[in-house]
């Protein structure tokens, strides 16, 4: 029984008018961890209903005049802040009001030691303990575990002695009847393992402990207690345990580290990893390094990885992960992998399908790591490498691994961000937390130049093929506007009118592109890789590198998912967007960035490319800004895109469409500025048929392919002074009748306009009328203020009755002040 549980039990006994508490008319349960200020304020604000404010003074006066009828239950004195202790201590010691009231305090044994008289609450008897265990595990639907624990306690006297569920002291002061209750916490995994140390580690005992600890995922710290205990029980037959996370810690001088922490020795490491290798149920091993203010010395790193190599040879091991290991372990990791894949161990890493290494990896170490994986990890399907060093040796090994691994489907890469930052003056002079947006932009430019010096002149003095033949689809005029898209042959840049923004085209010049990424992208184009992700790409990918990546995207037969976030400007993304039109494999493109501003020409070229693609299903452009001058032409391009593309999921979270500078006429409120609403008398038509009698580009259509719209905090600036967002986006959405998932959430910093009863009913009526298939609706941070709460909710219920939206409302709640 814990401290808070005992306090709650006393309060519950008073509420149920138990015999020993009937004399008290008022009981005040105060959680001291939340206590601030004075007692009267806490009772008024935390314990009494808001409508009781006017009567509080009368109540408090009564309590002071009838002190014997009051009991205070104060929970967690040891969690009370020093600033607030004086008033509570005066209450306990009867130095102020309520000197005749009863006060019960729960705390730890080492506090309030000046209270002299102590009473002891007896622990459970053997019969009571078994009864409690049976009740607890029956309530938790784990009756088998309860029987196993009871059997284990019966096996040995030491278990029975150590397993006393309630070991608590009740301490009373003779002054004014004050009382303090001290309760020890329930047992955790470490307590169970400690029991194994206190008795003989026989096979039956280890088996029972294993059954108690058997669950899907276990986290173990590298302390002596944990390692020694698990070394003994890992050989048992686990049924549920699949994932094991090792929290690698060392003894430090940090005062926050628990005093009981004892660092594992080399012998314990060896015993643990040997037992782990023999375990037959665990298939995933993750290691997280926690630095408690102490540096991991080279000797301690070497000791750990020398033993970690043992578990790399584990049969049926499927996943290996190093988490947040921000220290120099590259050489030791390489040695461990080389040792595990040596001829001494046959078939090591053969069953591994996922490797995630979040740690610094030097150039040569990457070369040897990938070489070892290429001739041993034949079933490797997912590879995540972050913290790489830009170097030719490591990338050559990575290229060889991609070419040889026919099962590799998913690749995530990131360079060593801290190392790139250290090459720039800005990041040397300031800490990362003190950087301004200007510093980040300037520093990013410097890092990009440093990382790609060999490729910055890739497109100079090289014979060029005809872009019209390679990229026919972006030079077409699907809307018959008469606008000609003509590329400038030098450098594969399209320059509108001979001047203006340079938009690179996705055609790589193999003879001149000298970047280390060239061979990597060429190998990806000819591999079976299906998913490619880059983290912090703006730090190391130049425009020529992205042109090469776009060329890879066009030519790859298998690359279906690309994630490339946070590039600096639209010039960097254009090779990717223009390559999509020529890809026959891409299905998901996530290119979120909060620094992108798209103008008319880039927008038109990108739409021409997207409309030509027949495989893309998911497009994410979160945080983009579209600064479009020609609203009418933008309308035509959007309608054409939605009519011809196969997009099923669109993410425009926190994106902005600025159409104000291109407005010809002021729009009518709640009429869609881009997508015309359906004719009021029209009925839904099959995909591709037009609404209304007018036809043509201006006729409204239903866009039936889109199923998921994520437009949280999407903003439309239609003309100065009018911003359309939230529920004002409904006129757009009624052109998408097959939506099943809709996110209209608002950010904390830019909440939507407050909805009253009438507005909320109108909103849900529009949803139920035009979006009948929505099953999942998110309205996070919306604000509602209902004058007639019950009636309004009933009317909303009637509107959505029999609609898929009915189930969505059960699972997605919005804030209601």
Image (tube, rainbow, N blue to C red):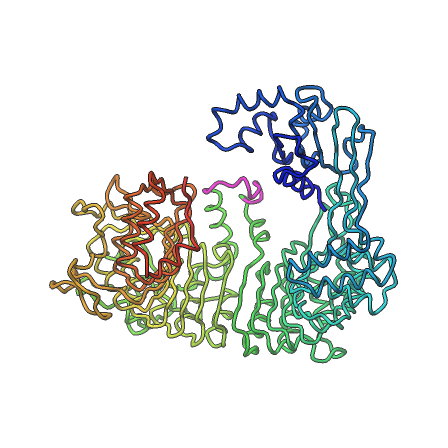
The one nearer the camera, 737 or 150, is 150
Left or right: where 703 falls relative to 298: left
The one nearer the camera, 636 or 48, is 48
Q: Quadrant of the C terminus?
A: top left
Which picture quadrant has residue 685?
Answer: bottom left
Q: Residue at x 66, y 20 (%)?
A: 97
Q: How many marks?
A: 0
> Could you say where residue 479 lies in the image, as x and y percent from the top left?
19, 65
> Could you say where residue 221 lies in the image, as x and y percent from the top left?
73, 56
The one nearer the camera, 680 or 605, is 680
Q: Look at the image and say whether residue 692 sits in the magenta stretch.
A: no
Is 672 above or below relative to 90? below
> Could you say where residue 618 lies in the image, as x and y percent from the top left?
39, 65
Q: Mark yes or no: residue 571 visible.
A: no
Q: Main secondary structure of the magenta part?
A: helix
Q: Residue at x 57, y 70 (%)?
A: 398
Left or right: where 766 falls relative to 346: left
Q: Residue at x 63, y 36 (%)?
A: 31
What range is drawn magenta here? 427-438
Is 657 above or below relative to 118? below
Q: Look at the image and say whether residue 437 sits in the magenta stretch.
A: yes
Q: Mark yes or no: residue 745 visible.
A: yes
The residue positioned farthest toward the left in the image shown: 693
Is 311 above or below relative to 162? below
């Amino acid at each position: 029984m814990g401290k808070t549980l005992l306090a709650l039990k006393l309060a519950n006994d008073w509420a149920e008018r138990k015999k020993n508490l009937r004399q008290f008319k008022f009981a005040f349960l105060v959680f001291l961890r939340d206590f601030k200020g004075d007692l009267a304020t806490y009772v008024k604000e935390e314990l009494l209903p808001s409508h009781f404010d006017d009567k509080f003074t009368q109540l408090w006066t009564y309590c002071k005049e009838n002190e014997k009828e009051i009991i205070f239950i104060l929970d967690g004195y040891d969690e009370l802040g020093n600033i607030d202790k004086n008033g509570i201590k005066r209450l306990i010691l009867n130095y102020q009001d309520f000197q005749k009231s009863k006060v019960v305090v729960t705390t730890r044994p080492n506090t309030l030691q000046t209270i002299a008289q102590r009473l002891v609450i007896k622990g459970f008897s053997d019969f009571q303990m078994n009864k409690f265990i049976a009740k607890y595990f029956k309530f938790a639907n784990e009756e088998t575990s309860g029987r196993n624990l009871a059997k284990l306690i019966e096996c040995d006297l030491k278990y029975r002695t150590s397993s006393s569920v309630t070991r608590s002291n009740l301490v009373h002061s003779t002054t004014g009847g004050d009382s303090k209750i001290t309760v020890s916490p329930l047992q955790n995994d470490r307590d169970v393992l400690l029991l194994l140390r206190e008795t003989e580690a026989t096979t039956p005992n280890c088996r029972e402990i294993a059954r108690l600890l058997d669950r899907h995922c276990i986290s173990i710290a590298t302390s002596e207690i944990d390692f020694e205990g698990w070394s003994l029980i890992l050989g048992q037959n686990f049924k549920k345990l699949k994932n094991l996370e090792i929290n690698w810690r060392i003894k430090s001088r940090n005062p926050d580290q628990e005093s009981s922490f004892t660092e594992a020795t080399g012998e314990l490491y060896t015993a643990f990893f040997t037992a782990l290798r023999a375990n037959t149920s665990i298939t995933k091993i993750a290691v997280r390094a926690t630095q408690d203010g102490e540096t991991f010395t080279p000797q301690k790193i070497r000791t750990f990885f020398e033993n970690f190599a043992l578990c790399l040879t584990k049969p049926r091991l499927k996943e290996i992960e190093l988490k947040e290991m921000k220290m120099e372990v590259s050489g030791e990791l390489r040695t461990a992998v080389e040792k595990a894949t040596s001829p001494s161990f046959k078939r090591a890493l053969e069953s591994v399908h996922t490797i995630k290494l979040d740690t610094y990896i030097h150039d040569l170490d990457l070369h040897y790591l990938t070489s070892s994986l290429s001739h041993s990890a034949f079933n490797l399907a997912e590879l995540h490498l972050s913290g790489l060093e830009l170097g030719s040796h490591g990338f050559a090994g990575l290229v060889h691994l991609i070419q040889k691994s026919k099962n590799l489907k998913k690749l995530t890469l990131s360079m060593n961000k801290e190392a790139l930052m250290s090459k720039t003056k800005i990041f040397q002079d300031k800490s990362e937390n003190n950087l301004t947006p200007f510093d980040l932009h300037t520093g990013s430019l410097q890092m990009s130049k440093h990382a790609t010096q060999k490729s910055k002149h890739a497109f100079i003095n090289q014979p060029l093929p005809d872009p019209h033949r390679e990229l026919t689809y972006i030079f077409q005029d699907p809307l018959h506007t008469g606008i000609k898209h003509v590329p400038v042959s030098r450098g594969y840049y399209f320059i509108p009118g001979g001047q203006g923004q340079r938009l690179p085209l996705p055609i790589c010049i193999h003879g001149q592109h000298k970047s280390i990424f060239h061979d990597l992208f060429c190998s990806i184009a000819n591999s079976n890789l299906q998913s490619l992700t880059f983290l912090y790409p703006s730090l190391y990918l130049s425009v020529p590198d992205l042109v090469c990546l776009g060329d890879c995207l066009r030519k790859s037969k298998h690359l279906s998912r690309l994630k490339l976030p946070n590039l600096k400007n639209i010039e960097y993304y254009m090779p990717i967007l223009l390559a999509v039109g020529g890809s026959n494999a891409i299905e998901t493109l996530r290119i979120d960035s909060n620094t992108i501003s798209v103008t008319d020409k880039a927008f038109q070229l990108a739409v021409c490319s997207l409309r030509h693609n027949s495989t893309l299903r998911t497009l994410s452009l979160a945080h983009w800004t579209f600064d479009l001058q020609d609203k009418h032409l933008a309308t035509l391009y959007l309608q054409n895109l939605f009519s011809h593309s196969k997009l099923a999921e669109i993410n425009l979270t926190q994106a902005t469409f600025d159409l104000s500078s291109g407005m010809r006429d002021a729009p009518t409120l709640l009429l869609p500025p881009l997508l015309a609403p359906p004719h009021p008398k029209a009925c839904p038509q099959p995909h591709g048929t037009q609404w209304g009698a007018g036809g043509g580009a201006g006729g409204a259509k239903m866009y039936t392919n889109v199923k998921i719209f994520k437009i949280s905090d999407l903003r439309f600036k239609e003309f100065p002074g009018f911003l359309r967002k939230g529920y004002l986006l409904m006129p757009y959405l009624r052109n998408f009748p097959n939506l099943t998932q809709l996110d209209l959430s608002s950010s904390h910093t830019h909440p939507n306009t407050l909805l009253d009863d009438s507005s909320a009913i109108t909103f849900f009526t529009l949803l139920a009328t035009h979006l009948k298939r929505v099953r999942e609706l998110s309205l996070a941070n919306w604000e509602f203020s209902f004058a007639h709460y019950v009636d309004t909710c009933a009317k909303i219920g009637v509107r959505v009755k029999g609609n898929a939206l009915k189930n969505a409302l059960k699972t997605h709640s919005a804030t209601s002040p």
